[in-house]
Image (spheres, grey):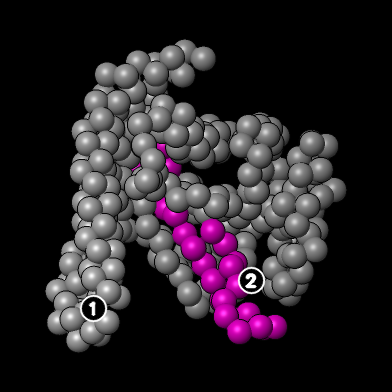
Amino acid sequence: MKRQDQFRIFYNHTIHPELMRLERLRLRLLGLIVLSALVLGGLFVVEAFIGEMVVMLWFAIPITLYLAYLTFRVRRFVQTFKPRIMNLVLDFIDDAPNLGELKYDANRDIPKDLFLQSKLFATSAPVYSGEDSIWGKVGEMDFHLCELKVQELSPVRSGLDLVFKGIFLHAAFPEDTHGQVILWPRKHRQFLTREVKAFTWEGGENADKEILNEDFKEIFMTYATKTTHVTGILSEPMQEAIVRYHRLTGKDLYLSFAEQDIYVAVTEPRDMLEPYLFQSNVSFELVRGYAEDIQLLLGIVEDFDKTH
């Protein structure tokens, strides 16, 4: 509760003024779009009245260039909004104990090979795109998270199937652990046949019997390689922390612990701090939601750091 009150004060004094400056930019851009739409509509009305297509052909090139300019302005607004607000949010978050300086890059992503090494999803990830990277240190653990969208060719129809869309996190523990543990949402087990088969083919097996937390067993399927000491990697406090995260967010959570690496995938349909164009972005609840998502994810890494 105290941290929430502190964020409200920080929002009022630091984030809200910046949101208001960006809101003025949005309104100017929106006015330009509306004016442009009226002018273009007027040109089409004139062309329809005159009935001479040659008139519109004369204007085709300048209209195309102008539309490209408007697209550039919209893209620049988005690229301006996210770093300004995200860096302010991170300034607040990294003041917490046990957190080092957090950095942000809107155009950086986690390398595809790390995503594949997690073995959370049975795919070669032929269509892989990421953005909005945040990285730093939690206790003794380095971490990197970003938004990812992973797709593959559909085997039953033309087009692409969505494999994963959300936030993907990789953290590295400074000491070696041995074996691999994978957690998949139990409610999606019918859609995870490929993933389970791929992991068992490499020597994995169901390890639910080693989990004593009944809430955890209800939410997750646990698989591990045969020589893995599951509770040595996935301690009871860690299980409680993961259950707590799931209940607080209600989001689907996938985790993989492999040697000293931790991989966390959280499904998220919305983009991280993607600004609106046709409605106001001045919203405490909107910004607080993203701040809480990041804090809860880092909390999992922090709990793992503390319990190991």
Which one is nearer the viewer's eye here, 190 or 51?
51
Q: Which mark is residue 50?
A: 1
Task: Sort mark 1 into few (<14), some (14-19) or many (20+) by Cα contacts within 10 Å.
Answer: few
Residue 238: tell me if it is visible: no
Q: Nearer the viewer, mark 1 or mark 2?
A: 1
In the image, is residue 83 above or below residue 96? below
Q: Residue 240: horizontal and vertical position, in percent?
A: 68, 32
Which one is nearer the viewer's eye here, 52 or 205?
52
Instruction: Determine whether the residue tagged by mark 2 lies in a helix, strand or loop.
Output: loop
Q: Residue 164: horizontal and vertical position, in percent?
A: 57, 62
Q: Is residue 248 left or right of residue 294?
A: right
* Residue drawn at (33%, 27%) of the image: 92
Task: Sort mark 2 into few (<14), some (14-19) or many (20+) by Cα contacts within 10 Å.
Answer: some
Q: Which mark is residue 201?
A: none
Q: Residue 69: horizontal and vertical position, in percent?
A: 18, 64
In the image, is residue 95 above or below residue 205? above
Residue 219: tell me if it is visible: yes
Q: Amino acid at mark 1?
A: Ile
Q: Amino acid at mark 2?
A: Ala
In this picture, which residue range is highlighted in magenta? 136-165
